[in-house]
Amino acid sequence: MGLDLLTIDSAITINNAFALWVEKLLQEFAFFLKIILEFLAILIIAIALVKSMQKFFRRQRYDNQMLHPSIRLDLGLSLALSLEFLLAADIVGTAVSPDWEGIAKLAAITAIRTFLNFFLHREVQELQEISQGMKPGLQIES
């Protein structure tokens, strides 16, 4: 009988060790994925900024306009995409074994980023309407 209890305790210990190892592996993968998503978000912003500045200086040289709506539209769409990547990174970072503090931070960050994204999409829609009014037949999907 004593041997059976020892066998059961050993099996439970092995299962717990395996579960902890799998959880640690998932945490490492989630951390790595979070870094990749954050890097992509920053890369999107950097590329959009460079493209916007090029368009701005090109337009400044030829049209002498301060800021063309299409430049703001392109930059706004890129910022919205970047916010989506950052939100995904936050979700991935909290996905494995979250504690209440992590969930509270995720809720706050999600609320702020959703708020920003909502108003950014609203401005993008307004800029699309302005661009469509300037160039008949132009349709931009959001």
Image: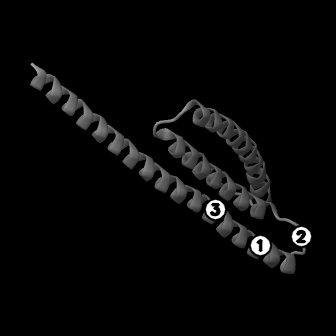
| Residue 53 numbered tag | 1
Considering the numbered disc 2 on the image, is that residue within a helix, a strand or a loop?
Answer: loop
Say which of 141 and 81 sits in front. Answer: 81
| Residue located at (64% from left, 39% from top) | 110
Q: Is residue 92 left or right of residue 138?
A: left
Q: Which residue is mark 3?
A: 42
Q: Is residue 139 left or right of residue 89?
A: right
Q: In this picture, is 118 found above or below 142? A: above
Gap in angstroms between the C-alphas marked 2 and 3: 28 Å
| Residue 65 numbered tag | 2
Q: Neighbour class for label 3 at 10 Å: few (<14), some, many (≥20)?
A: some
Marks 1/2 in contact by CB < 8 Å: the verdict is no
| Residue located at (60% from left, 46% from top) | 87
Say which of 24 and 8 sits in front. Answer: 8
Q: In this picture, is 86 found above or below 115? A: below
Residue 57 image position (x, y, % from top left): 81, 77
Considering the numbered disc 1 on the image, is that residue within a helix, a strand or a loop?
Answer: helix
Quadrant placement of the N terminus:
top left
Residue 80 image position (x, y, % from top left): 66, 51
Gap in angstroms between the C-alphas marked 3 and 1: 16 Å
> Which of marks 1 and 3 precedes in the sequence?
3
Q: Residue furthest bottom?
A: 61
Considering the numbered disc 3 on the image, is that residue within a helix, a strand or a loop?
Answer: helix
Q: Residue furthest top?
A: 1
Q: How is the image coloured?
A: one colour
Q: Is residue 22 left or right of residue 34?
A: left
> Which of marks 2 and 1 precedes in the sequence?
1
Q: Nearer the viewer, mark 1 or mark 2?
A: 1
